[in-house]
Image (spheres, rainbow, N blue to C red):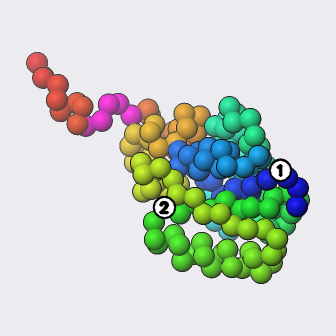
Amino acid sequence: MSSKRTALFPGTFDPFTNGHLDLTRRAACLFDRVVVAVAHSPAKGTLFPIEERVAMIRDAVRRLRNVSVLDFADLTVDCARRVGADVMIRGLRAVSDFEFEFQMALMNRRLSPGVEVAFLMPSQEFTYLNASLVKEVARLGGDIRDLVPPGVAARLRQRLQVAQPRASGAKRRGRARS
């Protein structure tokens, strides 16, 4: 094993949320190199094509010097081997995530015993956040600016053909009407 530690952060990232960005930043502080690996996942019926997901993530992590982004279409452990990762990062938002992630970690350990799995928790402000919720809020014209990086928000609005939301209802209600 080399002295430089490389972590693989795999996912579909459709779209990449501020929760994903938070975990990427945390991993970048813990490891010498972090590779965000974007899964093709055709069975999931993604909103964005792989090239666009990779471009959005590259834009979001461009200031993180030890982070790179690539796409993959094979087993996650094979991708980890290719990039020389000895650790796989997985996010845990709630106890409900644990069962699935635990099962996947055990399968990945069986397939590639040399790759460890490190579970990271996002900041409290992102524990409720997932890509499906973000897409639903965007689809219904809700404000997603605090949920995703700016470039992702713009592409989501464009893809779903929704206008930029105005100030939230709470802010509007507080204004006097004439």
Q: Residue at x 72, y 49 (%)?
A: 31
Instruction: Please rate how many residues cluster around mark 1, counting C-alpha atoms within 10 Å: few if below 14, some from 14 to 19, many from 20.
Output: few
Q: Earlier in the sequence, mark 2 or mark 1?
A: 1
Q: Quadrant of residue 141?
A: top left
Q: Determine whether, in the image, residue 72 is placed left or right of residue 134.
A: right
**Numbered badge on residue 4:** 1
Q: Which residues are magenta?
A: 165-169
Are dots 2 and 1 in contact, CB under 8 Å? no
User: Which dot, 2 or 1, sits closer to the camera?
Assistant: 1
Instruction: Please rate how many residues cluster around mark 2, counting C-alpha atoms within 10 Å: few if below 14, some from 14 to 19, many from 20.
Output: many
Q: Is residue 112 above or below residue 143?
A: below
Amino acid residing under circle 2: Arg
Q: Which residue is label 2 attached to? A: 93
**Numbered badge on residue 58:** none
Q: Position of residue 152 (x, y in %)?
A: 58, 39
Amino acid residing under circle 1: Lys
Q: Position of residue 119 (x, y in %)?
A: 60, 63
